[in-house]
Amino acid sequence: QDLYRRVHTLTGNANLAGLPVISQMAEALEALLKELYEKPNVINASNLRTVATAIDFLGILFDHAAAPGQQPPPSAQILVVDDEAISRRAITLALDRARLKSTAIEDPNVAYKLLTEGSYDLIFLDVDMPGMNGYELCTKLRALPRYKLTPVVFVTSLNDFESRTSSMMSGGNDFIAKPFHFLELAVKALVYVLRGKYPIGRKR
């Protein structure tokens, strides 16, 4: 509750101070903390790690808050690939919550074609899909020069160690198990997007 109140204050003050990037990140984290405070039964190791990551990233943004000409958060292109309509809709709604726009695709082969023709800043992949599973698609997109470093997050009902290992071996950056927490996914996505858009957010 105390952390939520502090981040709530930060959101408003960052907006007043003309720091839109910090404001957007704090706003997403604030919503997640409020949910965890009001519904402690949903707290787990995954969303606690996401909270910790977001706080660390806010620290990086603060270290560079005085950088000249900080602009509003740039738009990002996010691709969601999942053959389940309900899951696709859930992910896009979570991204909307963080004010992030996305393109949702059912067929992994169509998604790969889009990847070869366009440019995306973040990719969410289901694992169990017909024709080409998420691991195979991730391996293929990693072979494309423009996607060697693009963040890839697997969202799947598979939640065992072997699945996590496979996601990393195929080039994935992160893993969220279904059913996922809407606000956790929103915060995680925003961290990845802002890290990619602002060099200050990248690990040195």
Image (tube, grey):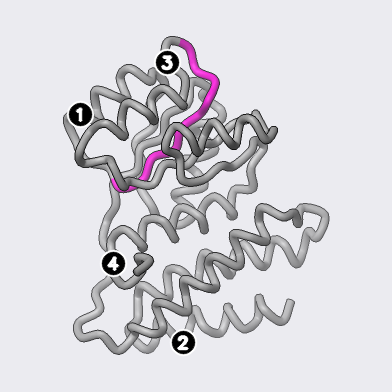
Image quarter of residue 87: top right
Question: Quick check: is 128 in the magenta stretch?
Answer: yes
Residue at figure coordinates x 39%, y 77% from the top left? 61
**Quadrant holding the C terminus:** bottom left
Q: Earlier in the sequence, mark 2 or mark 3?
A: 2
Residue at figure coordinates x 45%, y 39% from the top left? 172
Q: Which residues are magenta?
A: 121-130
Q: Earlier in the sequence, mark 2 or mark 1?
A: 2
Q: Earlier in the sequence, mark 4 or mark 2?
A: 2
- Residue 20 vs 168, above or below: the answer is below
What main secondary structure does the magenta stretch of the protein show? Answer: loop
Q: Answer whether labels 1 and 4 touch (C-beta < 8 Å).
A: no
Q: Earlier in the sequence, mark 1 or mark 3?
A: 1
Callout 3: SS: loop
Q: Nearer the viewer, residue 163 or 91?
A: 163
Q: Position of residue 120 (x, y in %)?
A: 27, 42
The nearer-to-camera label among 2 and 1 is 1
Q: Which residue is mark 3?
A: 132
Cα distance, mark 4 to mark 2?
A: 21 Å
Callout 4: SS: loop
Q: Nearer the viewer, residue 90 or 195?
A: 195
Cα distance, mark 4 to mark 3?
A: 33 Å
Q: Amino acid at mark 2?
A: Asn
Q: Amino acid at mark 3?
A: Met
Q: Answer whether labels 2 and 3 touch (C-beta < 8 Å).
A: no
Q: Which residue is mark 4?
A: 198
Q: Which residue is mark 2?
A: 13
**Quadrant holding the N terminus:** bottom right
Q: Amino acid at mark 1?
A: Thr
Q: Which residue is mark 1?
A: 116
Cα distance, mark 2 to mark 1?
A: 42 Å
